[in-house]
Image (cartoon, rainbow, N blue to C red):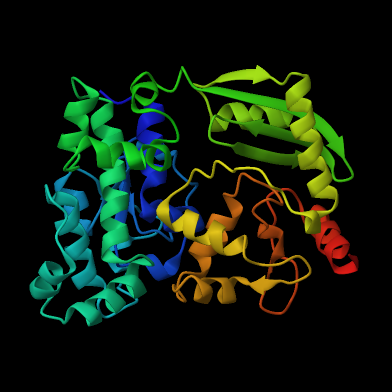
Amino acid sequence: MATAQQRAEATVADPRWAAVAARDPAADGRFVYSVRSTGVYCPPSCPSRRARPETVAFHATPADAERAGFRPCRRCHPGRALPANPHARLVAGLCRLIEGAERAPTLAELAQRAGLSPFHLHRVFKAVTGLTPAAWARAQRARRVQHELGRADSVTAAIYDAGYNSSGRFYEDAGAVLGMTPRAWRAGGVATEIRFAVGECSLGAILVAQSARGVCAILLGDDPDALLAQLQQRFPSAQLIGGDAAFETLVARVVGFVEAPRLGLDLPLDMRGTAFQQRVWQALQKIPPGETLSYAELAHRIGAPRAVRAVAGACAANPLAVAIPCHRVVRGDGGLAGYRWGIERKRALLEREAKD
């Protein structure tokens, strides 16, 4: 049986979680989510306190949630949530088909099922979900393999039960899907080593952490102990190891980059997130120092113009301050919106980059 941490990782890896985290009203009508601890289901925009990801499950329709034994939330009344897109119900059905298929349907098969041309379906599906059908299928397969690794008798059995045609293809994807080796995942991540160190920079305390894949966290704040607690929350089963002299050199490079972002950071990054978050973070890295984009412009840039709130949610989930420059995203009127590490730090970074 999967552990709570593994269930949480599987939920966060699902592209629908970004919409729930952002309380995106544009996602209403595409799906609902249920909360095991309360027994209710809600649309993505529900204003209730955000549920812990390990307690969340996704359903294509309210009827599916009710068949699973959940009741409507009395605060948001999900039965009243209407699809914001005329194709939302069609795409929801196709998502359900993909989730239940042992082999991911091809675009042609999905198009035939929908009664649309492959080109039109591709556009409709991406407009509703923010992902292409192929990207959605990959995200579902990633979620499935995470689940199977927690209960299968062996790694090999989990690979094939999740829908991979070969173990070689899975091991090519394993780093991005799991962030660690499959055996480490089955053990709850206990064998994963993450080195870290806490220092000081002009923006306050800074924590830098590195996994075997690259820098996995750059956190800013006022309290070093709070930063360490954030790291432990993000990697609860990993072995956290205080950095040695060699690691201090890496930290110094990161601090130098934070002080002068135009210098760049020539270090590998371990970016763990949903498929949608990865798209947003990659687009953020293409914004040069001294320039800004609005959330709407960033949503257009990734090809999901209706996913503005989900884009904001992906920015808020960014674990790599400055390296993934979410501080370069502002409101449509140019004003400063929320920043995970504080508006004053965001203002300081933008002013610094404008002067360089």
Quadrant the N terminus occupies:
top left
Q: Quadrant of the C terminus?
A: bottom right
Residue 176 is situated, as x and y percent measured from the top left of the image, at: 42, 42
Q: Nearer the viewer, residue 55 or 142?
A: 142
The residue depicted at 89 percent of the width and 44 percent of the height is 202
Using residue 203 as the reference point, say whether residue 118 is left or right of it: left
Please tell me whether residue 30 is drawn above or below residue 33 in the rendered image: below
On screen, residue 277 versus residue 242, left or right, reads left
Q: Is the residue 110 above or below the residue 206 in the image?
A: below
Q: Residue at x 13, y 50 (%)?
A: 103
Residue at point 91%, 67% (across, down): 355
The picture places residue 165, in percent across and down from the top left corner, at: 16, 43
Above or below: residue 115 compared with residue 207: below
Q: Is residue 315 left or right of residue 115?
A: right
Residue 47 in sight: no
Q: How many marks?
A: 0
Q: Position of residue 315 (x, y in %)?
A: 59, 57
Q: Quadrant of residue 84?
A: bottom left
Question: Residue 57 at x, y = what percent?
Answer: 30, 44
Q: In this view of the protein, can residue 350 be seen by the observer?
A: yes
